[in-house]
Amino acid sequence: MYTLHETLVAAAIPLRVMAKFGSQVFGHPDSPFRYAPGSERIAAGSELLARMVKHYKKPAWRIHDTEVGGQSVKVHPRTVHNLPFCHLVRFEREGVAPGPKLLLVAPMSGHHATLLRDTVRMLIRDFDVYVTDWIDPRLVSLAEGTFGFDDYVKYVQTYLEYLGPQASVMAVCQPTVPVMAAVALMAADNKPLPKSVVLMGGPIDVRAAPTSVNEYAETHSLRWFDINVISRVPTKYPGFMRRVYPGFLQHSGFVAMNPDRHIDSHLEFYNHLLQGDDDSAEAHRAFYDEYNAVMDMDAAFYLDTLRIVFQQHLMPRGLLNVRGKKVDLAKIRDTALMSVEGELDDICAPGQTVAVHELCSGIPAARHKNLLMPGVGHYGIFSGRRWREKIYPQLRDFVKAQL
């Protein structure tokens, strides 16, 4: 399946070149063809076609500066810690004292960590931010072994210990479960805990508010997923023969959840090009450059997550074990806990994340906080105007109050 996909991508190269050529010939200001009748439609259609058959690579962070104390400060993303499946990236602010340390755990669920660009832009104003920049498994040699749920938990523990006890941790969506497991295991071992834990729209207990995503996972067996969505990495990549859930299949699933929305978005893009609305067209390009850039997921982690989170609900049932150790969230005492949910979230519906507070019964009531944001979907929790203006100020104040 993966090899067939790569063959089709290669076969589409001539079409992509022709479409890009048509866009430039009939759309570039210096081209005489731009002023021919109907040229704007040819140029717009050509660009739309070129983008539909384009192979999207991992985007850059594109974060070069921030504002601290009313002053513009340069920012430099630097890798400070390497593990086989992840780079820990620190966003260093030039010429100012580091803020409180905060570990932002990005999802390993199809998209690159750069999907959290808007999240990082706000956090670096007030915090010394470290981000888990997961490596596409197809780029990791099979000699490094597989990467499962237990490995994810271990990576989070490693990074928390690397940052020290004064750090806070924030998890967006899928990593909320392994992050809570890591903190619970650290508490059981009497290790210093992060000052605060912030969970953003995550599947702590999917039984609380099932969505179509949860129902799909529950109505198919692990064997079905193994047969139908797992493939091996082709020969052209360093991870040759690694079993993965390919990014292109994940992307198909993302689109299939809201096909009408994506069709309308592309039609609007075509019309923006015809109307010369460059700002709207550029916003479309920026969003889909990120949305269409997908990465594979190691089969072990994908199947583990399906079983642990979506089928057997091991954490909320108190049955989760990691590397032979029982995960008991009630043992967490010396940290503060905040959950954030979006009213319109159709991936992790309201109720799934807030369930963590009942499980963390050892944390004093005064150190619990839940924020349910009206009119916000899944991506709006950590990106966009409401994230910047409504959610982030409360998150910032909660985390800083624990220091």
Image (cartoon, rainbow, N blue to C red):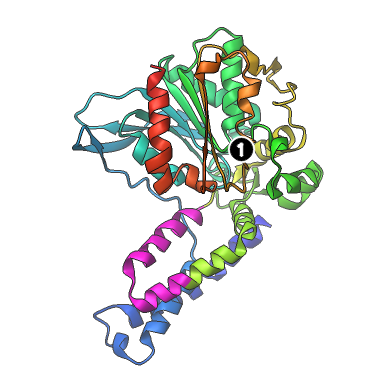
Residue found at x 54% / y 48%: 377
The residue type indicated by label 1 comes to Leu
Image quarter (top left, top right, bottom left or bottom right) of the N terminus:
bottom right
Are there few (<14), some (14-19), or many (20+) residues within 10 Å of tag 1?
Answer: some
Write the start and end of the magenta stretch as one range: 268-293
Q: Main secondary structure of the magenta part?
A: helix
Residue 52 colored in magenta in the image: no
Q: Quadrant of residue 179?
A: top right
- Residue 67, x across and y down, in percent: 24, 38
SS for callout 1? helix
Residue found at x 42% / y 42%: 387
Q: Does 138 sit above or below residue 73?
A: below
- Residue 388, x across and y down, in percent: 38, 42
Q: Is residue 178 left or right of residue 289?
A: right
Residue found at x 61% / y 63%: 259
Residue 171 seen in this snapshot:
yes
Residue 270 colored in magenta in the image: yes
Q: Does 260 sit above or below residue 318?
A: below
- Residue 337, x across and y down, in percent: 52, 23
Residue at the extreme bottom: 37
Residue found at x 47% / y 21%: 196
Image quarter (top left, top right, bottom left or bottom right) of the C terminus:
top left
Tally of numbered discs:
1
Depth check: 241 or 325 in front?
Answer: 325
Please name the residue that numbered disc 1 is placed on: 142
- Residue 226, x across and y down, in percent: 76, 45
Q: Is residue 398 left or right of residue 12?
A: left
Q: Quadrant of residue 129?
A: top left
